[in-house]
Image: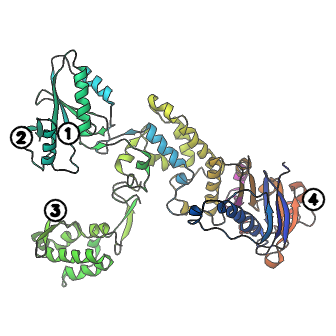
């Protein structure tokens, strides 16, 4: 055991009575005692708070402006105090954070899928392929025989211009063969697609250089898509340097880490915004009064809408009353909407009516009498379809995250990763497996990785924190733990003890604890007391477990020797 120590002098925080003591560092120290004796006042309100305050105080003023600094505890001096981290005691993460995101496992799974995932078409479920430009040249040279005539065609994606404007631009660049609807045209229709014939070639010896240059031009024009057609009207084959589904025509850029983040615009499911659930109300279940106009029964719901949206909605309802479909089945039109634009107001502005639920969703207003249900597009998995259709050995990131810790520990090492991508994952998989092993060691192998933090018990949440701290591999810190054995079966306490011991490598651990195994497994014990509140605030024992068992005036020591009843309730917080 080290001789390094943390020295505290004259502490009067809360009920502590001018406390002065020396606490050994780089070892496990347990603070125990009756409820209300001052354990938390010493561990959290003094040592943790001052360690945090000192560290944050030396950050730049710009950073400190966004952080609420802790108040200085009532203490004369503390020497040898390291930066502090705490688990439990109101430090736990809430919100949509999951076990996998809190332990950084999700970040490493994201890297794994970015490096080794195979993108599939959401339309067909089939794997998508992309090629480099040299690979496209070689593929065409090998697939078309000598003497065959082919056309190299670039599909033009219209973004900030009309088809006619794009045609004029291409003609000015020297491209004379413009296709629309698969046919060569002199003037394109703005409502149709637009393609340009970049080159017509006859496959023969010496054609490589010209073909390579034309392929470069076509891919630049189309932003990564090349169509090769036999003759003028024969079979068409796609060659792409982005992912394209030939059957549906959908194209996808390579996925990045942002595409796997449900909180980013790039990764979130477009239907639910990355929440995983939608709020809808079944208006058909309402008891409509047939003797009253539907208009009068619907408009009270509009008070939740922004004023401008409310006025527009009322105008739409007025226009609906004269529509043939509304006259035939008014309730259906109100709820489900119309398939065609609706002429609204005196100026007959054309608007699309998509129904009541869509009205509230688009306005981001609270839907009256709504029920929350899983999103029908992402099925509660929060990510956009193209991300969910990225697979490794048939598994998506969502299916892996849904697994329990223990199951994921067995599944991950067996994933069949393409040989060409294995080298890219050699450093990623061990990081995931190590963190999963830490979760298993603290007795959380039964939890699903996508379990939300705010649904965990205090004991479970704190042990997730412990596993996260182990995975971070930090050193030079003082870890302050609040009853990490809370909610843990006695058979798992020994494994927890090993995890706590692992934190000591290069750091120090101070934990408030009542569990006999953890008390006796500590290097140093501080017992607070003798009573609670005004009767506490003193150190009534300090020393090793051996000294504790031989102390005749220690309630905890007498209890551990089974000579007295427990001096505290195990479940009671300090």
Name the element at disc 2.
loop
Where residue 303 sits in the image (x, y, percent)? 31, 80
Q: Earlier in the sequence, mark 1 or mark 3?
A: 1
SS for dot 1: strand
Considering the numbered disc 3 on the image, is that residue within a helix, a strand or a loop?
A: loop
The foreground one among 572 and 139 is 139
Viewer-proximal residue, 94 or 164? Answer: 164
The residue mark sitting in front, 1 or 2, is: 2
Q: Nearer the viewer, mark 2 or mark 4?
A: 2
Q: Are marks 4 and 1 in contact (CB under 8 Å)?
A: no
In three-dimensional space, the C-alpha distance between marks 2 and 3, rounded to whole angstroms, equals 34 Å
Q: Please name which of the two marks, 4 or 1, marks the residue nearer to the observer.
A: 1
Is 107 left or right of 275, judged from the image as shown?
right
Q: State the residue position of label 4.
A: 550
Mark 1 against mark 3, which lies toward the viewer?
1
Q: Which residues are magenta?
A: 480-495
Does the segment drawn in magenta span residue 484?
yes
Q: Which residue is mark 1?
A: 155
Decide if residue 154 is on the left or right side of residue 106: left
- Residue density around tag 1, few if under 14, some if 14–19, many if 20 or more, within 10 Å: many
x, y percent for residue 489:
69, 56
Residue 307 in the figure: left or right of residue 188? right
Q: Which residue is mark 2?
A: 186
Q: Earlier in the sequence, mark 2 or mark 3?
A: 2
In the rendered picture of this protein, how many numbered marks are placed on residues?
4
- Looking at the picture, the colour scheme in use is rainbow
Q: Earlier in the sequence, mark 2 or mark 4?
A: 2
Residue 552 visible: yes
């Amino acid at each position: 055991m080290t001789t390094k120590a943390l020295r505290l002098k004259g502490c009067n925080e809360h009920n502590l009575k001018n406390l002065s003591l020396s606490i050994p560092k780089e070892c496990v120290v347990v603070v125990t005692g009756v409820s209300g004796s001052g354990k938390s006042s010493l561990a959290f309100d003094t040592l943790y708070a001052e360690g945090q305050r000192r560290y944050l105080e030396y950050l730049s003023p710009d950073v400190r402006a966004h952080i609420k600094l802790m108040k200085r505890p009532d203490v004369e001096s503390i020497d040898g105090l390291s930066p502090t981290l705490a688990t439990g005691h109101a430090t736990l993460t809430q919100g949509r954070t999951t076990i996998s995101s809190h332990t950084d496992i999700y970040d490493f799974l994201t890297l794994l899928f970015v490096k080794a995932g195979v993108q599939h078409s959401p339309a067909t479920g089939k794997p998508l392929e992309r090629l480099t430009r040299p690979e496209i040249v070689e593929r065409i040279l090998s697939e078309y025989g000598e003497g065959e005539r082919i056309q190299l065609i670039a599909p033009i994606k219209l973004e900030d211009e009309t088809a006619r404007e794009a045609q004029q631009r291409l003609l000015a660049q020297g491209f004379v063969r413009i296709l629309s609807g698969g046919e060569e045209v002199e003037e394109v229709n703005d409502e149709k697609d637009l393609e340009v014939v970049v080159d017509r070639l006859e496959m023969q010896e010496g054609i490589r250089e010209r073909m390579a240059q034309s392929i470069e031009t076509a891919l630049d024009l189309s932003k990564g898509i090349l169509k090769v057609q036999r003759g003028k009207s024969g079979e068409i084959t796609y060659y792409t340097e982005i992912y394209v589904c030939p059957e549906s025509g959908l194209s996808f850029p390579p996925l990045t880490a942002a595409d796997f983040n449900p909180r980013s615009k790039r990764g979130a499911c477009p239907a639910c915004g990355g929440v995983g659930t939608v709020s809808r109300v079944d208006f058909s279940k309402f008891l409509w009064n047939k003797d009253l106009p539907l208009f009068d029964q619907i408009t009270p719901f509009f008070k939740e809408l922004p004023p401008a949206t409310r006025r527009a909605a009322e105008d739409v309802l007025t226009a609906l009353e004269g529509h043939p479909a509304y006259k035939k089945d008014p309730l259906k039109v109100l709820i489900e909407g119309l398939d065609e634009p609706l002429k609204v107001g005196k100026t007959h502005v054309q608007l699309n009516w998509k129904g009541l639920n869509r009205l509230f969703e688009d306005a981001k207003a609270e839907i009256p009498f709504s029920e929350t249900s899983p999103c029908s597009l992402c099925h509660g998995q929060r990510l956009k379809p193209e991300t969910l259709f990225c697979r490794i050995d048939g598994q998506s990131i969502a299916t892996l995250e849904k697994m329990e810790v223990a199951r994921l520990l067995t599944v991950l090492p067996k994933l069949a990763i393409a040989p060409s991508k294995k080298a890219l994952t050699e450093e990623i998989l061990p990081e995931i497996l190590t963190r999963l092993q830490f979760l298993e060691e603290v007795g959380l192998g039964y939890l699903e990785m996508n379990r939300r933090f705010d649904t965990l018990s205090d004991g479970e949440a704190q042990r997730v924190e412990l596993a996260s701290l182990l995975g971070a591999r930090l050193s030079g810190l003082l870890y302050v733990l609040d009853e990490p054995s809370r909610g843990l079966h006695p058979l798992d306490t020994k494994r927890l003890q090993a995890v706590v011991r692992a934190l000591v490598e290069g750091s120090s651990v101070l934990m408030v604890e009542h569990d006999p195994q953890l008390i006796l497994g500590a290097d140093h014990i501080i017992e607070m007391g003798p009573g609670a509140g005004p009767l506490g605030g003193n150190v009534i024992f300090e020393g090793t477990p051996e000294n504790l068992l031989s102390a005749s005036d220690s309630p905890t020591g007498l209890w551990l020797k089974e000579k007295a009843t427990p001096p505290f309730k195990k479940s009671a917080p300090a």
